[in-house]
Image: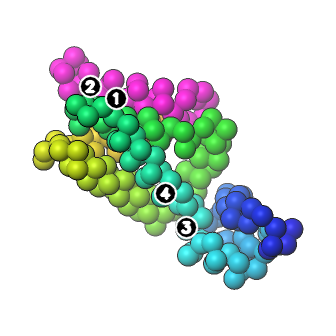
Amino acid sequence: MGRWEPGARERLQAAALDLYVERGFEQTTAADIAASVGLTERTFFRYFADKREVLFHGQERLTELVLEGVAAAPADATPLAVVVSALLGTAEFFPDDRREHSRRRQTVISAHPALQERELLKMAGLAATLAGALRERGAPEPAATLAAQSGATVFGVAFGQWIAEGETRSLADIQREVVTELLSMSSGAR
């Protein structure tokens, strides 16, 4: 396949993940990734700033889905109810057929502190965006920040369960269960 064929970004992403799992993140270069799909290193850098970004591409779409979920929440919803709406909106980004890819991606990230840091920054940015959207809806502080940070934690816990071996529930179902658990803890039910 040549560089002019469609789907270069997707091919580079798939090849990068395969190589990271096979060889290791540190041992794989951008040139290796590009060559494995018949592209040049220069073409790789047209799509990605560096080899880490292959793993984190798509963050913009996830943020859009969060904001769409915030907008879809009823005007009188509590900050936490708005966060639940935002979380459920992210589930479409993670259909069941993407679970194995997400498992493999997480394996690579978990093995490298610099990638773990990048993942944490991504989640912190998502929480900050969510808190800002809550404030724009009129949520006061500290409610906006507490709800947003709780939402980021719920997302992280639910995502970890979703990618666990043998898991078959949808991300949305797991998110609902984790929110229920959070609410039961805060109501003193435990």
Q: Is residue 27 magenta?
A: no
Return the residue at label 4.
Answer: 59
Q: Residue at x 13, y 45 (%)?
A: 140
Residue 91 drawn above or below residue 33: above
The reply to whether residue 92 is visible in this rendering is yes
Residue at mark 1 to residue at mark 4: CA–CA distance: 23 Å
Q: Which residue is mark 2?
A: 183
Label number found at residue 53: 3
Task: Tell me the amino acid under the disc marked 3.
Answer: Glu
In terms of secondary structure, where does tag 2 sit? helix
Count residues near mark 1 (Cα–Cα under 10 Å), then give few for <14, some for 14-19, many for 20+: many
| Label 3 SS | helix
Q: Which residue is mark 1?
A: 179
Along the horizontal axis of the image, is 160 left or right of 142?
Answer: right
- In the rendered structure, which disc, 2 or 4, sits on the residue that comes first in sequence? 4
Chain-order first, disc 3 or disc 4: 3
Q: Earlier in the sequence, mark 1 or mark 4?
A: 4
Q: Is there CB contact under 8 Å for labels 2 and 1?
A: yes
Q: CA distance from mark 2 to mark 1?
A: 6 Å
Q: Amino acid at mark 2?
A: Leu
Along the line of sight, which residue is nearer the eye, 33 or 25? 33
Q: What amino acid is found at the position of numbered circle 1 in the picture? A: Val
Hey, which residue is sitting farthest top in the picture? Answer: 189
Query: Looking at the image, how many numbered discs can be counted on the residues?
Result: 4
Position of residue 107 measured from the top left corner of the image (x, y, whole percent): 57, 51
Residue at screen point 53% across, 60% down: 56
Q: Is residue 87 left or right of residue 58?
A: left
- Tell me the CA gap for discs 2 and 3: 35 Å
